[in-house]
Amino acid sequence: MNLSQVSASKAAAAVTVRRRQSARLPGRFISGMIAPSMLVILFVVVFPLVYSLYLSFTSYTLLKPVTNWVGLRNYIRLFSDDVFWLAFGNTLLYLFVTINLEYLFGLFLSQLLARTVRGQSILRTLLMIPMMFAPVLVGFQFRWFFNDQVGLVNNLLMQFGLISQTIPWLVERATAMFAVGVADIWMNTPVMTIILLAGTLSLPRELYEAAEVDGASGWQKFIHITYPLLAPFTTIAMTIRSLDVARGFDIVSIMTGGGPAHRTELLWTHVHRTAILDAKFALGSAMSYLTIIVTIGFTLYLFRQLLKARLVE
């Protein structure tokens, strides 16, 4: 091998080394950029989850911070806790009614917006206004609406002669749950509407043109084309709202505080009352993990429905 061949091989080796180093550089740069956020997630999310799981098997309280191992005692106690099961039933009722009504209103509004020709962007902007309010503000707003003395709802009903005396909306279980549900539906219906509107606008127009040629009416097109094809978007919207329904804690906490006499108690308000107000942190952690298990189970069910809808397509 002559001198020129040796020089060429060294140059080629140097180029290969530089390419490998340059290929490693983006990976190291990306890892360095991700590392701070991963550390934040580790200490803010992962560590509290693992530590609270550990505490749920102890006798830890805020007044007596001693982690004596008690095994499954906290979980067993929940099965004989009448307030826990009342809160569990209220949560299921709240979840079922609010999400289904939000879906119906969202489906109706999305179909109206999809057929609106002029001012659609303005209507979409106005529709998103309820989403911009924090749940705490919505709770204060609707607590005033349903106040039995100076509330807007009672004043309007009395002005129109529909009632002769004020209704204590936030006292009785049925009316209090109704008031809390109205607040939640008002705030979160736009979420359903936007997702279903995006799905409606993405549907192929050829199907509607073929249906029009066959003489199908608007209702028939909705029943046989729009509604079946919106199944994946429906499942996505309901999954998002099911996971997000925990924000109902803010609304319930502000409007009723879970009372009176636990009549509007939800799982999240009961966990807060047990862990923070009653200082039974270990028992509250056990409640939280049972709530997480129920939420994961419901989410997996919705994802299975989503996969079935895609297979049908």
Image (spheres, helix red, strand yellow):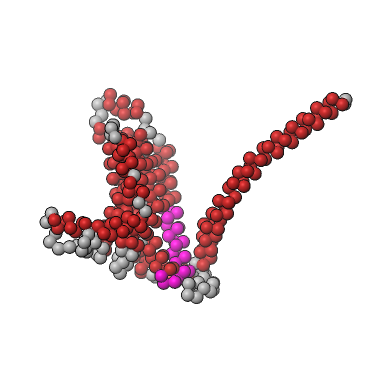
Q: Quick one: quadrant of the C terminus? A: top left
Q: Residue furthest right?
A: 2
Q: Is residue 233 above or below residue 246?
A: above
Q: In this picture, which residue range is highlighted in magenta?
A: 277-298
Q: Is residue 25 above or below residue 151?
A: above
Residue at position x 33%, y 41% in the image: 125
Please state the horizontal and vertical placement of residue 14, each as a whole percent of the image. Answer: 77, 33
Please tell me which residue lies in front, 94 or 130: 130
Residue at position x 37%, y 53% in the image: 134
Please state the horizontal and vertical placement of residue 205, each as a whole percent of the image. Answer: 34, 28
Along the horizontal axis of the image, is 241 left or right of 109?
Answer: right
Please state the horizontal and vertical placement of residue 117, each as a whole percent of the image. Answer: 28, 31
Per the picture, the main secondary structure of the magenta-coloured stretch is helix
> Does residue 279 belong to the magenta stretch?
yes
Q: Quadrant of residue 172?
A: bottom left
Along the horizontal axis of the image, is 5 left or right of 16?
Answer: right
Residue at position x 28%, y 41% in the image: 108
Residue 283 visible within the image:
no
